[in-house]
Amino acid sequence: MPWKEVNAMTQRLRFIRDARERVASFTELCRHYGISRTTGYKWLERANHSGLDYLQELSRRPQSCPHATPPELVQRLIEARPHHPHWGPRKLLKLLHRQDPRQPWPARSTVAAILRRHGLVLPRRRRSYPGHPGRPLTPMAPPT
């Protein structure tokens, strides 16, 4: 375990012990340990509910994404792609919109991202552009 993580866990353990023993006022304890009172209350609440599990840092990843494309639409896009392997997102959207016009289909860029995410689109080959040739190797004479 990295030193910082061990040190943070030890700090939390000491803070909880001191808070439970009421060594000082809660505000003074938080100031001493260099944390906000909000964080102190959060640690104390976690310690009371989950035992030593509160020592671990919890994930900050969002639980859900409200504007994500619904899984049903993603599934329909993925299922339509093998039937038309050379079609891009615009044509696939047009086809699916014709099949179900009341469905709120995502934007073309979103469909392209979904197809790319699921490995249904080959990345374009990069074209190399030769750079500027540079200065001429021999000096140029003016026209005569």
Image (cartoon, helix red, strand yellow):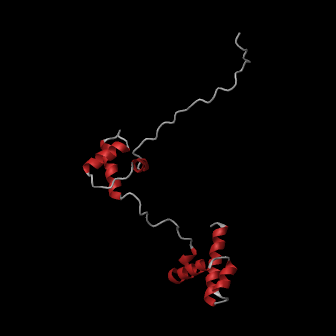
Q: Is residue 60 left or right of residue 99?
A: right
The image quadrant of residue 122 is top left
Q: Quadrant of the C terminus?
A: top right
Image coordinates of residue 89 in percent, x first then y, are 37, 45
Residue with the most extreme front position: 144
Q: Residue at x 33, y 47 (%)?
A: 93
Where 56 falls versus 119 (above or below)? below
Image coordinates of residue 22 in percent, x first then y, are 64, 90
Image coordinates of residue 71 in percent, x first then y, are 35, 58
Where 3 falls versus 46 (above or below)? above
Let me know if residue 53 appears in the view: yes
The image quadrant of residue 36 is bottom right
Q: Residue at x 41, y 43 (%)?
A: 121
Q: Residue at x 70, y 25 (%)?
A: 135
Residue with the most extreme bottom position: 22
Q: Nearer the viewer, residue 83 or 69?
A: 69
Q: How many marks?
A: 0
Residue with the most extreme left position: 99
Q: Is residue 29 left or right of residue 75?
A: right
Image coordinates of residue 64 in percent, x first then y, are 43, 65
The image quadrant of residue 11 is bottom right
Q: Nearer the viewer, residue 93 or 144?
A: 144
Q: Residue at x 25, y 49 (%)?
A: 99
Let me know if residue 81 appears in the view: no
Where 46 falls versus 138 (above or below)? below
Q: Nearer the viewer, residue 120 or 73?
A: 73
Where 143 falls versus 126 (above or below)? above
Q: Nearer the viewer, residue 76 or 90?
A: 90
Q: Quadrant of the N terminus?
A: bottom right
